[in-house]
Image: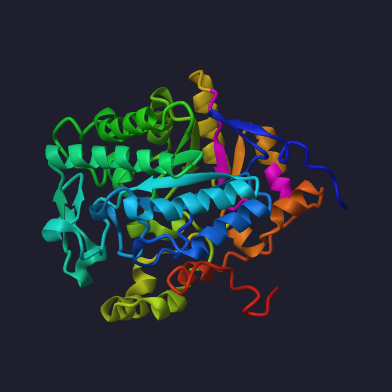
Amino acid sequence: MSSPRPLACTPALFGPLTLRNRVIKTATYEGMTPGGRVSPQLIAYHGELARRGVALTTVAYGAVSADGRTFGEQLLIDEANLSGLAALTEAVHRAGGAACLQLAHAGGFSKHRGISGRAPRGPSLGLNAYGLAHGLPLIRKMSDDDLARTLDAYGYAAALARRAGFDALELHCGHGYLLSQFLSPRDNRRRDRYGGSRWRRLRFPLAVARRVRAVAGSELALAAKINLADGVRRGLGLDEAKAVARALTEVGVDAIIPSGGMVQRSAFYLLRGDVPLRAMARVERDSLQRWALRLFGPLFVRPWRYGSGFFFDEAASLLDSLRAAGHEVPVALLGGVDSASLIDRALARGFGFVALGRALLADPDLVERLCAGEDVVSRCDHCNQCVATMDEGGVRCTLDERGEA
């Protein structure tokens, strides 16, 4: 039976923006930036999301510097990509949507051989297991000069995004990348002003947020994706996540997008569902890593059980913490948002938006059907085969290919 979805499909404020509805396409790596360059495929992908009704579509995992890439195919935010990014925002705007660019830095989590000095930089000296097969076994502790250059890189990326016509920016402070590494007590073992207590671990991420906020000005909205929990022992947990959210809001972040997990240690904490090791090994280009996945993957890649709205309770607790502190910024519900009934429940609970990834891959018309009053349930069966397609010509849902539509 069809019923109206008035709240999900009504305009909502996100900083200086008025979005046409409350459905956001969350940042998920597209696999459509060969050599780090914007492709016609990437432009068409985000333009189509806007055409099908998404209010804000987020271009994923834009590296703020060449040394901040996890791999060579990652989008690089630089002058050479300005015209391509401008074409993308134009396509999104032409379809009635708003465009967001995620700003990221790999930190110590990299296998990109083009890194200067042949060692990725992170908060602390450590082992880079992800880069072992690529001649990058170590993480070098960032110096004050490294931190200053990285802060400038975030500012440069924000300025270029503004020139390209983006409506919003998202700081990636989760999933085990640089800002997440600084926040995590497991990864940040520094003994200077950037490590130790939670407030010292917050210092550099807050400096980045201030810089990006200053460059973005009053015209661009600014969100931050953060971890509710790292999903590993001695990692960041919910109490600290609440402090992170409050601190980011106090320096000018307009919305919080809670997520979880660390790609290098607990990748499927943030996805849940099946772990498609065979498909991941098939598309892995490095032969050593391919065999490692086949032989040892089950030992190191832990599965996490899927549940509809799997971050709901923790994200709601974070939302309550912000409200208790007097912060009225919107919080998005992300993670297993797979039905109209869950969207209704989330918005009734006080979430400002819902952020969808796999559900929109499986059902590109989900927003259209939702706003037509249909009681939508996503076809996504959380098989996570889409993870492998990121390295196979661009992310897509494989349900139809498997004859399981």
Residue at the front extreme of this rendering:
83
Q: Residue at x 73, y 49 (%)?
A: 340
* Image spot of residue 268 (x, y percent): 45, 60
Quadrant of the image containing the C terminus? bottom right
Query: Which residues fall within the magenta stretch?
Result: 328-343
Where 131 falls versus 2 (above or below)? below
In-front residue for pair 261/123: 123
Q: Which picture quadrant has residue 158? A: top left
Q: Residue 25 appears at what percent x and percent y?
A: 57, 50
Decide which of 136, 368 is in the foreground and name it.
368
Q: From where the camera sits, is residue 17 visible?
A: yes
Which residue corresponds to the image point at 65% horizontal and 32% vertical from the top-left? 12
Q: Nearer the viewer, residue 350 or 317?
A: 350
Q: Position of residue 391 (x, y in %)?
A: 42, 71
Residue 286 lies, with reference to residue 329, above or below; the image says: below
> Left or right of 332: which side holds 38?
left
Residue lying furthest top: 326
Q: Is residue 377 above or below residue 325?
A: below
Q: Is residue 9 magenta?
A: no
The structure residue drawn at horizontal position 32% and vertical position 31%, both measured from the top left corner, is 211
Which quarter of the figure has residue 212? top left
The colour style of the image is rainbow
Looking at the picture, how far across and down is residue 124, in whole percent? 17, 46
Inspect the magenta stretch and tell me whether residue 336 lies in it: yes
Number of marks in picture = 0
**Along the viewing direction, whichever of 52 and 127 lies nearer the viewer:** 52
Q: Is residue 338 visible?
A: no
